[in-house]
Image: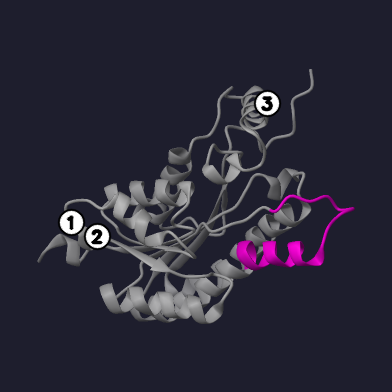
Amino acid sequence: MNASLTAPVALVTGGAGGMGVAIAAVLLDDGFRIALLDRRGAAAAAHSLATSDAAQILGVEADVTDEESVRTAIEQVASTWGRVDALVNNAGIEPQHTMENLERGTWQATLDVNLTGPALMIKHCIPLWRRQGGGRVVSIGSRVWLGGGSVAAYSASKAGLVGMTRAACRELGPLGVTANVVAPSFVRTPLNAEKGDAEFVEAYLRRFAEVSPLGRLVEPVDVANAVAFLLSDRARNITGETVHVAAGTQLAPFVQ
């Protein structure tokens, strides 16, 4: 049988962004068929990654905050390929704010995308995993779940993602599904480049490298490699864990 017809299927939300594309590229190399889900740009991102076998990648318009959109997108992938083996909850936003100037809408929008979205994606994949007898979930968190960050809504959403994943792994375990979090530090992506002008972002990146025990930055491919490992059979008995891909910046600064 054509291997492309039997290859495992992975959904990647936020698939049109820099991190989503990096994750998809590594998973394609690992033999997955990939469905990139995003509110916009999914088809273009899929086209940019397309290999000689166009049947290996699919772009799907979807909004993870809209349950009907989530259900429709997963049904589209299932009707195209017949299964979903892995879910990568990568979609995320980080509107800047302080506690003093926080607006309720900003708080709610952040939790809707970063926390409710992954929960809805898991919910609507469960019937497929029950039928298939297993699956994998990896959600993209952040080092700030542990150490805190400058943006309260984002930090809260990523801490919540860890808690939700730990609860989900108990429910999903009897179905043969593992659920884990990959928590990066600040990574050079188009989304993070929007946090300030080029000079500010470069200075911020340098500070991250300086406080890292390894003295270097995390790249998108580092995060993608961790995701790929957790989706593989080599990680079949790892569940409920948070894997920091942060070059050590998840630790408190070392004071001599």
Region in magenta: 95-115
Cα gap from disc 1 to disc 2, whole angstroms: 6 Å
Q: Position of residue 78 (x, y in %)?
A: 33, 76
The mark tally for this picture is 3
Is 38 on the left-hand or right-hand side of 105? left
Q: Residues within 10 Å of mark 2 (few under 14, many from 20)?
A: many
Q: Amino acid at mark 3?
A: Arg
Question: What is the number of the mark on residue 207?
Answer: 3
At mark 1, the secondary structure is: loop
Viewer can see residue 230: yes
Q: Which residue shows up at 11% across the image and 63% down it?
A: 2
At mark 3, the secondary structure is: helix
Front residue of 5/97: it is: 97
Above or below residue 202? Residue 31 is below
Disc on the earlier residue, 2 or 3: 2
Front residue of 52/134: it is: 52
Q: Write down the residue under mark 1.
A: 53
Q: Which residue shows up at 63% across the image and 65% down it?
A: 115
Q: Position of residue 27 (x, y in %)?
A: 34, 51
